[in-house]
């Protein structure tokens, strides 16, 4: 019997639709513990491929007989072999996950957030395997992309599907946990590429400086993207207020946590800026604004429709990082609860500055692993 394949898109839909699946992960224990596909309705078993070279008999009793089994590895090769061994042992509902965890890291799911005034639309691109969130704002046949990841074809193909032209591309800050696709997307489409100048001191390419209080119009229906200087995660971090309704916070504020200030090695210097942004600048904004961050940390942050979004007022009441009245306690909480640095974060920063140009496979390797942009 031929082993069936399961695509990464199939896995993504099962995650978003809360379907059940048994996932047999045949990567090493260290790789599995560091990063895996997350879902509240998935069951898991981790057995390294090398432990199964002599056969799968010893794990058969741990596998379900009446539930689909998806075998996943790093790239898709080992999973195919293990799945074949399971089929030979008599299991029929077995799948090999195409592309493995590398493909999972790259998959984007577009989700519509809202209609905007005068016929515009707002979409969120959810990178489930990495926790990255990027956005498309459309109006009057034009589109703006915010915090694009390196898989830029996802945006150009979706724009073509909607019949809109990408005219403006924004990065809220110089990213350190993933490679930005902003500059490449702008070059491909002829769009203007915007970057906060405070984060661009070492970049080696041309960009349009994005400054506090800038207004960039998209299309003819006056949907403005208002820039709001909001340092703390980086010195140049900039938020956007879209359509007077949505607050794109970059990596400053998340649904269940706040941004870390140390990815340029300046936690002690920037923690004060972080507090100023969260406790003063954002406090001056309307509680009714819908926060749309650039990352999420855990699957519980996703809403039923698959989007990651919450009212600013709700976050001020529920997010622990927004409710520490003592400034010294806040400083300790931020600087003493930092997770490990993202994998290859310095090389990622240099790539986003244009200083180095790793090839496609090197970029994939640099990004492998979980999102680590938040304070724990």
Image: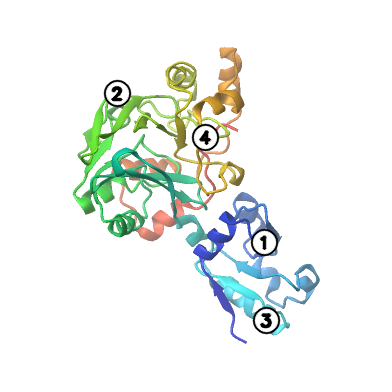
| N-terminal label among 1 and 4 | 1
Q: CA distance from mark 1 to mark 2?
A: 46 Å
Q: Is residue 312 left or right of residue 160?
A: right
**Under tag 1, what secondary structure?**
loop
Q: CA distance from mark 1 to mark 4?
A: 27 Å
Q: CA distance from mark 2 to mark 4?
A: 24 Å
**Which numbered marker is on residue 310?**
4
**Under tag 4, what secondary structure?**
strand
Residue contact between numbered discs 2 and 4, judged by CB atoms under 8 Å:
no
Q: Is residue 324 visible?
A: yes
Residue contact between numbered discs 1 and 2, judged by CB atoms under 8 Å:
no
Q: CA distance from mark 1 to mark 3?
A: 20 Å
- Reading the image, the residue beneath label 1 is 20
Percent coordinates x, y for residue 40 in the rendering: 67, 52
Q: Residues within 10 Å of mark 2 (few under 14, many from 20)?
A: some
- Reading the image, the residue beneath label 2 is 212
Mark 2 vs mark 4, foreground winner is 4
- Reading the image, the residue beneath label 3 is 87
Residue placed most toward the observer, 132 or 82:
132
| N-terminal label among 3 and 4 | 3
Residue drawn at the location 61% of the way across and 16% of the way down: 329
Against 177, residue 321 (above or below) is above
Question: Residue 28 is drawn in which quadrant?
Answer: bottom right
Percent coordinates x, y for residue 182 in the rendering: 31, 45
Percent coordinates x, y for residue 247 in the rendering: 41, 31
Residue placed most toward the observer, 54 or 103:
103
Residue contact between numbered discs 3 and 4, judged by CB atoms under 8 Å:
no
| N-terminal label among 3 and 2 | 3
């Amino acid at each position: 019997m031929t082993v069936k394949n399961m695509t990464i898109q199939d896995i993504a839909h099962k995650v978003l639709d809360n379907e059940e699946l048994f996932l047999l992960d045949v990567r090493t224990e260290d790789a599995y513990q560091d990063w895996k596909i997350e879902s509240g309705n998935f069951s898991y078993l981790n057995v390294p491929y090398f432990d199964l070279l002599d056969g799968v008999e010893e794990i058969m009793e741990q596998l379900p007989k009446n539930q689909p089994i998806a075998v996943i590895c790093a790239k898709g090769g080992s999973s195919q072999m293990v799945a074949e061994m399971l089929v030979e042992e008599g299991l029929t509902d077995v799948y090999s996950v195409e592309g493995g965890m590398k493909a999972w890291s790259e998959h984007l799911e577009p989700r519509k957030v809202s209609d905007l005034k005068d016929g515009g639309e707002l979409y969120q691109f959810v990178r489930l395997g990495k926790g990255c969130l990027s956005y498309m704002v459309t109006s009057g046949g034009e589109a703006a992309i915010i915090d694009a990841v390196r898989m830029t074809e996802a945006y150009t193909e979706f724009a073509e599907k909607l019949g809109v032209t990408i005219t403006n591309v924004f990065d809220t800050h110089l990213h350190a946990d993933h490679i930005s696709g902003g500059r490449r997307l702008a070059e491909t489409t002829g769009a203007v590429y915007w970057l906060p100048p405070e984060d661009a001191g070492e970049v080696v390419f041309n960009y349009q400086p994005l400054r506090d209080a800038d207004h960039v119009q998209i299309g003819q229906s006056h949907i403005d993207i208002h820039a709001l200087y909001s340092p703390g995660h980086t010195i140049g971090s900039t938020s956007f207020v879209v359509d007077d309704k949505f607050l794109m916070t970059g990596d400053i504020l998340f649904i269940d946590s706040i941004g870390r200030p140390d990815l340029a090695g300046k936690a002690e210097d920037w923690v004060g800026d972080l507090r100023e942004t969260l406790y003063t600048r954002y406090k001056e904004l309307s509680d009714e604004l819908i926060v749309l961050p650039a990352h999420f940390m855990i699957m519980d942050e996703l809403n039923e429709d698959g989007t990651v979004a919450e009212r600013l007022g709700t976050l001020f009441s529920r997010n622990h990082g927004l409710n520490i009245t003592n400034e010294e306690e806040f400083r300790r909480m931020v600087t003493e609860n930092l997770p490990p640095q993202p994998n290859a974060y310095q090389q990622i920063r240099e790539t986003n500055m244009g200083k180095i140009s790793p090839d496609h496979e090197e970029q994939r390797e640099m990004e492998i692993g979980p999102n680590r942009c938040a304070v724990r």
